[in-house]
Amino acid sequence: MGKAATEAKLAEERALVLSRHGVSRETLERLDAYVALLRTWQARINLVSPATIPEIWTRHVEDGLVLGERARGTVRWADLGSGAGLPGLVLGILVADREGAEVHLVESNAKKAAFLRTVARELALPVTVHAARIEDCGAVLSAVQAISARALASLDDLFALVAPHAAPDAVFWFLKGRAHESEIAEAAAHWRFDMVKHASPVEDGSVLLEIRSLERLRAP
């Protein structure tokens, strides 16, 4: 896709997302700045699939907006394997002006962590970046209201990562694709949990899983 076509597609996708999600002028300014920084850094490091650049708004940003709307009362987040800041930086933008807001982004890749810190600094977000493995961030996970992850690991593996550290009343928000039913079945063999499935507008068959009361099943 040529430059002009890419810009036209970006504008079209942006308008579509904004028609579905009402955001303040300040939030929109930060979202635009984030997308601009992502595109600049994408030329240096691979943050998202290059083929999805023209659809940044619908393929990537909208996931975070949907999550933020579902968890509107949450201001203390930990986002695991943040990568390009999806959905973590979008969540940081949404809660930027709210009292007590703190968003922790856990990303072990040093280059991606540098990108996350740059965006957080330039957009004045209440974001702390942890360039570390999830297993080493137990204190962070235990102090937040909610934990999110997108395209990181299977549900069973995610549960194993967060269960030892998360607060008893923590809510887990995991964005999953079309294979989510098999992941849920696999996890249900090892864990007890309450779950609500929210349909996602991002892709047919994709869902946002809202999970509470996570507990490992005892071996028979």
Image (cartoon, rainbow, N blue to C red):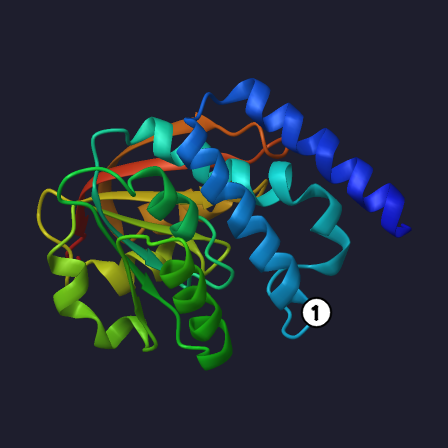
What is the quadrant of residue 206 in the picture? top right
Count of numbered marks: 1
Q: Amino acid at mark 1?
A: Ala
Give the answer, above or below, for where 107 lies relative to 76: below
Residue shown at the point (44%, 26%) measured from the top left:
23
181 and 103: which is toward the camera? 103
User: SS at mark 1?
Assistant: loop
Give the answer, above or below, for where 168 lies relative to 38: above
Q: Residue furthest right?
A: 2
Residue shown at the point (23%, 77%) measured from the top left:
136
49 and 91: which is toward the camera? 91
Quadrant where the image shows the C terminus: bottom left
Residue shown at the point (40%, 29%) measured from the top left:
197
Give the answer, above or below, for where 137 lies relative to 63: below
What is the quadrant of residue 97 in the picture? top left
Q: Is residue 176 visible?
A: no
Q: Indicate the position of residue 28 as horizontal and vertical percent values.
A: 48, 34
Q: Residue furthest bottom?
A: 110
Q: Is residue 150 visible?
A: yes
Q: Indicate the position of residue 51 as horizontal and vertical percent values.
A: 77, 54
Q: Indicate the position of residue 184 as horizontal and vertical percent values.
A: 41, 43
Residue that badge 1 annotates: 43
Judge the density around disc 1: few (<14), some (14-19), many (≥20) Cα neighbours within 10 Å. few
1 and 49: which is toward the camera? 1
Q: Indicate the position of residue 107 as horizontal and vertical percent values.
A: 39, 70
Q: In the shown orientation, is residue 2 left or right of residue 186?
A: right
Residue shown at the point (11%, 56%) measured from the top left:
143
